[in-house]
Image (spheres, rainbow, N blue to C red):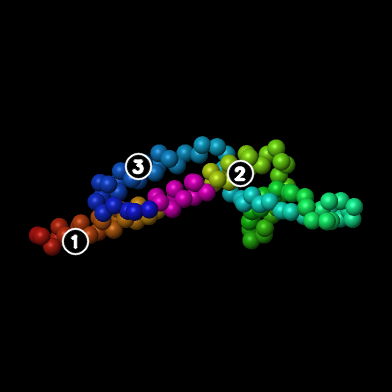
């Protein structure tokens, strides 16, 4: 993201990002993964090559990775929820950058005013 130099523009960008910060759907801080695996039956098609698909959510909690199976009918919802988390996380990063830029421009503007007087 390109950060503007002028404090007024930075404030305008900040307000725009703050308005976008509201969640549009449930938020899920996890990763949705698809795993191909064999079932163990020697007569099954997965033993010859075409493996079974399984969808799982993984997340970390207190330094431990947790995994839960996601039924096929819930995969689109889970995908949307994890994407919403990514979107909000990116917005928070941008808000942080803009806030820091606003502080930095304030400091440089104050130094300019002090140099003039």
Mark 3: which secondary structure?
A: helix
Mark 1: which secondary structure?
A: helix
Report x, y in % for residue 56.
Answer: 69, 49
* Residue 38 visible in this rendered orientation of the protein: no
Report x, y in % for residue 29.
Answer: 58, 49
**Which of the two residues, 47 or 76, is positioned nearer the viewer here?**
47
Total numbered labels: 3
Cα separation between marks 3 and 2: 28 Å
Q: Which residue is mark 1?
A: 111
Q: Which residue is mark 3?
A: 15
**Badge 2: residue crowd in 10 Å (few <14, some 14–19, many ≥20):** some
Q: Which residue is mark 2?
A: 79
Q: Quadrant of residue 108 in the image?
A: bottom left
Along the horizontal axis of the image, is 38 left or right of 23? right
Along the horizontal axis of the image, is 87 left or right of 117? right
Q: Which residues are magenta?
A: 86-95
Report x, y in % for residue 107.
Answer: 25, 59
């Amino acid at each position: 993201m390109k950060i503007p130099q002028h404090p007024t523009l930075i404030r305008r960008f900040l307000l725009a990002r703050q308005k976008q910060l509201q969640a549009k759907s449930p938020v899920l801080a996890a990763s949705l993964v698809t795993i191909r695996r064999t079932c163990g039956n020697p007569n099954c098609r997965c033993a010859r090559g075409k493996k079974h698909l399984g969808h799982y959510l993984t997340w970390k909690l207190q330094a431990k990775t947790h995994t839960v199976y996601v039924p096929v009918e819930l995969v689109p919802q889970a995908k949307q929820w994890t994407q919403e988390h990514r979107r909000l996380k990116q917005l928070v990063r941008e808000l942080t950058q803009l806030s820091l830029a606003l502080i930095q421009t304030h400091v440089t503007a104050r130094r300019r005013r002090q140099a003039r007087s």
